[in-house]
């Protein structure tokens, strides 16, 4: 195959979408195998949908570009997840956490999902606030990055405990076919890395314009949101609001604090001027979701329309 074709942006973008779809397809297979919805969204999906952001950190480090692009990438990704990718499913199908049935067990399960999502959304405040506090001097250094990574893995240990507890209750056993699933996920992961690396190299060669290295963080942040969009529309169309919500919020945790922490422990990460207003907007949107779920157990269609409008304003301000 022609090597120039392998570096063409249209091919790289197609490869990114195909690899993302492969990973989501196998993720659905895991779901059919009995992985519970909120656990799937909080513990499994974020690593798959957020893998592009993690690989972007590696590519930026490899190419020696500014860490500010990593922060912008993460801010754009999180803003897109919490506004557009929750607002559109809410507008089209509605996102309701009401129990699917009148049985006591169904009501209890729905309430547990709601409480878990409220905690996940509140964690966005915590992680964002800690990142802001550590970066008040304008830079995240090695110690700051180490603290952020430690906080992230402490948060993940809580979800691991929930998975192990559920596994004991259900007497679950290891399925050897899981190794095949992991192999397919690894293939998808390599496809993501190859496409992201090529797209970053391509953008780096364009000096000015909307599609150029000047907007590296913005453009890649939008690109990394595409796998989340597939998840959001797939599970939203099936009425699985808990998975839609937890996947978007969980991916926000992968970006902040994990991605920025990983970069900061290698090189100091300078915070761009957009950091403070963007993190405040993300915190405000997270608060809006907490209030909606706490009071109404749903995100109304009109609320979805408001979130889409806010996202349009965010893009206009960022461009």
Image (tube, rainbow, N blue to C red):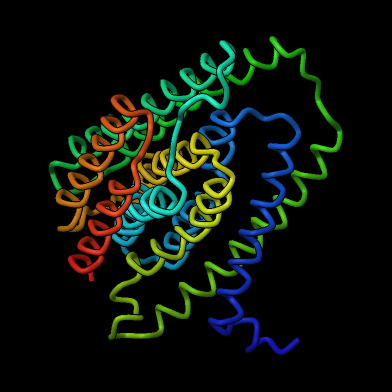
Identify the residue shown where x is 77% and y is 48%.
183
Q: Quadrant of the N terminus?
A: bottom right
Q: Nearer the viewer, residue 174 or 122?
A: 122
Instruction: Report the front residue among 315 and 150.
Output: 315
142 horizontally vs 187: left or right: left
Q: Position of residue 182 (x, y in %)?
A: 74, 44
Among the 4 quarters of the image, the one containing residue 60: bottom left
Can you give x and y, in whole percent of width and height, for residue 134 in the image? 21, 36
The residue shown at (64%, 51%) is 24
The residue sitting at the front extreme is 102
Q: Residue furthest right?
A: 176
Is residue 290 visible in the rendered image? The answer is yes
Q: Nearer the viewer, residue 196 or 45?
A: 45
**Which corner quadrant of the image does residue 273 belong to?**
bottom left
The answer to whether residue 50 is left or right of residue 255 is right
How many discs appear? Answer: 0
In the picture, the quarter occupied by the C terminus is bottom left
Instruction: Give me the residue at 35% from left, 32% from top.
Output: 121
Q: Is residue 61 above or below residue 268?
A: below
> Seen in the image, is 126 located left or right of residue 117?
left
Q: Give 282 or 71, whichever is nearer the viewer.
A: 282
Q: Residue at x 68, y 44 (%)?
A: 28
Left or right of 264? Residue 29 is right
Where residue 55 sits in the image (x, y, percent)? 51, 56
| Percent of width and height locating residue 215 | 30, 72
Answer yes or no: is residue 151 visible: no
């Amino acid at each position: 195959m022609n090597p120039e074709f392998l570096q063409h942006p249209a091919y790289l973008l197609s490869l990114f979408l195909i690899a993302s779809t492969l990973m989501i397809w196998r993720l659905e297979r895991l779901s059919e195998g009995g992985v519970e919805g909120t656990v799937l969204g909080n513990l499994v999906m974020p690593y798959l949908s957020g893998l592009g952001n993690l690989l972007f950190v590696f590519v930026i480090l490899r190419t020696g570009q500014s860490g500010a692009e990593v922060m912008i990438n993460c801010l754009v990704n999180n803003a897109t997840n919490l506004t557009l990718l929750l607002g559109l499913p809410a507008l089209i199908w509605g996102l309701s956490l009401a129990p699917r049935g009148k049985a006591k067990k169904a009501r209890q399960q729905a309430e547990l999902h709601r409480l878990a999502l409220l905690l996940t959304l509140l964690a966005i405040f915590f992680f964002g606030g800690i990142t802001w506090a550590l970066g008040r001097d304008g830079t995240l250094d090695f110690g700051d990055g180490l603290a952020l990574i430690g906080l992230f893995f402490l948060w993940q240990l809580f979800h691991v405990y929930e998975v192990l507890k559920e596994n004991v209750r259900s007497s679950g056993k290891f399925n050897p076919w899981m190794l095949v699933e992991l192999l397919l996920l690894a293939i998808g992961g390599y496809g993501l890395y190859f496409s992201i690396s090529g797209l970053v190299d391509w953008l780096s060669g364009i000096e000015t314009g909307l599609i150029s290295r000047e907007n590296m963080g913005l453009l890649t942040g939008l690109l990394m949101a595409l796998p989340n969009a597939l998840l959001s529309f797939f599970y939203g169309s099936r009425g699985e609001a808990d998975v839609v919500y937890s996947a978007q919020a969980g991916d926000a945790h992968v970006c902040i604090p994990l991605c920025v922490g990983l970069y900061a422990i290698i090189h100091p990460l300078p915070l761009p001027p957009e950091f403070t207003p963007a993190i405040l907007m993300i915190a405000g949107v997270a608060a809006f979701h907490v209030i909606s779920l706490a009071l109404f157990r749903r995100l109304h269609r009109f609320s979805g329309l408001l979130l889409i409008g806010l996202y349009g304003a965010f893009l206009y301000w960022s461009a």
